[in-house]
Amino acid sequence: MTAPAAAAEPLARPATLEVADLRTHFFTKAGVVKAVDGVSFAVAAGEVLGLVGESGCGKSVTGYSILGLVDPPGRIVSGSICFAGRDLVGAPEEELRRLRGSRIAMIFQDPMMTLNPVLRVDTQMVEAILAHRSIGRRAARELAREALAQVGIPAPERRLRAYPHELSGGMRQRVAIAIAFINAPDLVIADEPTTALDVTIQAQILHLAQELCRKTGTAMIWISHDLAVVSSLADRVAVMYAGTIVEQGRAGDVVGAPLHPYTRGLLGSVPSAVARGVRLAQIPGMTPSLLDLPPGCRFRARCPRAGEDCGVEPTVSSPRPGREVRCWRPHLEAAA
Amino acid sequence: MSVLDTGTRIEADRAPAAAAAAEETPLRRLAADFFESRVAAAAFALLCVIIALALLAPAIVPQNPYNLAEVDVLDSRLPPGSRAMAGYTYWLGTDGAGRDLVSAMLYGLRISLAVGVVSCLIATVIGAAVGLVAAYAGGRVESLLMRLVDLQLSFPAILIALMLIAILGKGVDKIIIALVTVQWAYYARTVRGTALAEMNKEYVEAARCLGFGHARILFRQILPNVLPPLIVVATVQAAHAVALEATLSFLGVGLPRTEPSLGLLIANGFEYMLSGKYWISFFPGVVLLATIMAINLVGDQLRDVLNPRLRR
Amino acid sequence: MAAYILRRLVQTAVLVAVMSVIVFFGIHVVGDPVWLLVNPQMDQRDIEAAIRALGLDRPIWEQYLYFIAGALEGDLGRSFIFGEPALRVILERMPATLELAFAALAMAIVLGLPLGLYAGLRPDSWASRTIMAGSILGFSLPTFWVGLMLIMVFAVMLGWLPSTGRGATATWLGITSSLFTLDGLRHVLLPAFNLALLKMSLVIRLTRAGAREALQQDYIKFARAKGLAERRVVGVHLLKNILIPVVTVVGLEFGNLVAFSVVTETIFAWPGMGKLLIDAIQSLDRPVIVAHLIVIVMMFVLINFVVDVVYTVLDPRVRIGARAA
């Protein structure tokens, strides 16, 4: 990664993707669920951005919003998603379809559910190729086989003819990754791809993803709830809470010297961070309901540092170069 | 502003809501949910009207269609709106035997509904009993009973009914037997499924520990929880029973000619169809259709409302 | 796969055996079997002779064996009315019924599947609500009344289609059917539609429920994320998953269709098994009734078996099993 840049420009290279103040709301019978409520970040080519947060904080919805795959009753309410010079918000469906799978690809969490159980692996790979390129079916199948070999699947020909349930979890996820990279996309969004896998396989998949990104110069957004996984893989990290990003910066900085009280709480509650016999720290309270957000800072009710001024929603500030935080009282003492 | 404050505020918010919920009984809540759908409410109203008409039939119709003295065969096959010799109007015309169609229809509705409801009730009792016993006894007993149920359910109702009538002969009681035989298996299967689920719950275990007898557990604990799906199946089956009885009567193997149900009225009108006297078959059919549809719509809404997975 | 089929065959054979016992002893328990096989209108001496000839004075288990032996040879008694072997009488009329049931099934699928699919894809649209309301109407309508109304409208008032009977037949690939002639198609249209209405509602509801459930699955989202055209997402990914349960249910319903054709055949004077049964019940032609019952049971068992096999073929998960690579 390049040297730290000036305060207002965290990226040294031009951004592949730039999300500005994205808001995606779900209009349900019970009310408006503000799943994503003011999210801004950017990803550069070849860079891995880790999007971290607990379940229900809106990270997956952010991923879907980028691809335009938000299911009704949800929709993008405001904000912009700048990709390859175009704003994807409000773009026509056909244009989005052409981008999906070819310029922007997505890897989902559970490969058993994302690969269609009644179709063969080669069918599902070939159709991903043929949707964007007009080459012959046989040529497409060749590409598919090569892709499988590249992600480290032995005997790819046999795997091509198999059905998803005949493959192990790790192998299915490799297939999903192969499909994601097969059209050489500029951006890959990986939505918790290792959560459903065994720990040993997790490491393999992580390594594979990292390697592919470096080799092809693809930008990647790695969505996860596991800070440990993300910190080993990502170049930069963005921490999400209740629909907004509360802290962003280089992975080493965010994990080593967290600014936001929530990030600090997250790191403090990781078992390995604490010595044996010492009680595990917890963040008291519960995430606020996205239906009925309290006014002011969303973390206020659980924050040990909250004060009077936290009754107003904090704006994003950059107290240190290359880092952003959404807090009136960040932990400045720890940061360099 | 500390965490504790927020905690108590949340608790306090919840308390009044809970208290309000405790005031309304489950029945009231059920009714409120049920009538949310305008279609279902309309269907329910229609059903009430139909039942009222059937019950009050003798009082409101101008003629008793089974009393041959009142029926004038010379008045047969008159179109709707014609006048009778006795002075009243044949609002919907007359059938082939000279019976006023309105009267015949309402009387026929009485019989159709009566047969349908009675057979439904008997089948419910039998089916529920079998289902409960099967679920509670388990093991071989359950296996045997359920195989029987499966066997019965894999054959079409109309065939079983026809076969039974072929063997037993005709008559109101035979029809009811046939209808009951055709229906009980549905109840048995539903009740067994629900009872099995209930039996795994802890309150049954608790009751056993307290030493309650089998019968008591079955009837006081499990049965009330089995009622909701049972009611839903009952409404659907009631509609089927009415339709099946009408079909059997139409085919000539149902209720006897002397007390015609709607099915038989429609059958009677069959021969006049080709000469354009449509009303003899048409109007009884509309009444039959309205009855079945109302029951089905009510049953549909009941199923949605009583479905625990959809409960908010 | 072969082991599975063999197992199912054995199960089927056992089921048939059990059914035969039930049928036989059921008839004995409920009615007097003498009148089942002997025409009550013969005079007394002939009756006694017939009783001895048919072995009806033997112990019951011996009678059962005679029954089975006869059944295996295809002898299920003689029709009182026709004087011919009951089985032959039924088999002669079976093609007509099968034709009708087949046409009705085809119609129910061809019309019901697209409607249900549409209702599932756009559940809140006006058209979809109409379709669902229509489907409730569809299975509330008494089949026989609809048949009458259809005749009234299309045959009497409009005169477009014939009201009764079966059309001319033609032979193709060794099968003789009225579906192969234009006249035959004209005749089969109304009765098939009448019979199809009930099943159409079922198909619509099934397809819609299946579509709605499948649409929520991740593989649909993934297919879209790959940038596939919506046409392919629905036509291949969605459809293949829905088709399995729909086909299974519909296949099983074929038996119901055959049974319910009794009503339609009566109204439209279609010369099939169903009409034969009603006539037999009215005229107390008991051998035909018994034979009819047995044929239907066999048919059901066979249909169940076929559907089971087809299901295994269609669903790769069942076929291949959880073989981890």
Image (cartoon, coloured by chain):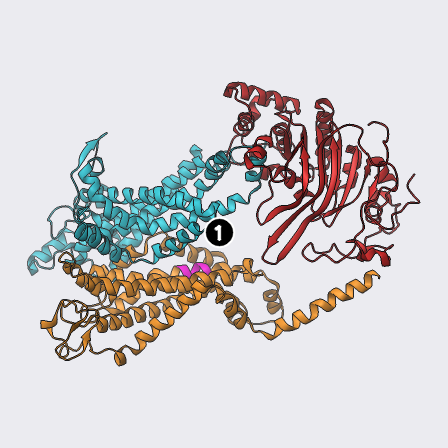
Chain colours: A red, B orange, C cyan
Question: For this view, does A10 lie left or right of residue A68?
Answer: right
Along the line of sight, which residue is nearer the eye, B108 or B170?
Answer: B108
Along the line of sight, which residue is nearer the eye, A97 or A212?
Answer: A97
**In the image, what residue occupies the spot 22% across and 74% down?**
B103
- Amino acid type, label 1: Asp
Q: Residues within 10 Å of mark 1 (few under 14, many from 20)?
A: few
Residue A271, relative to residue A290: is it above or below? above
Is C323 in the magenta?
A: no
- Note whether residue B169 is visible: no
Boundaries of the magenta span: B186-190
* Chain ID, mark 1: C
Residue B312, relative to residue A88: is it above or below? below
**In the image, what residue occupies the spot 61% across and 36% down?**
A111
Residue A4 x, y percent position in the rendering? 86, 31
Residue A233 x, y percent position in the rendering? 77, 33
- Residue B73 picture quarter: bottom left
Along the line of sight, which residue is nearer the eye, C1 or C271?
Answer: C271
Q: Main secondary structure of the magenta part?
A: helix
On the rendered image, what quadrant is the N terminus of chain A found in?
top right
Residue C114 x, y percent position in the rendering? 40, 42
Residue corresponding to mark 1: C124
Residue B167 x, y percent position in the rendering? 23, 60
Question: For this view, does A124 lie left or right of residue A169?
Answer: left
**In the image, what residue occupies the spot 33% across and 71% down?**
B50
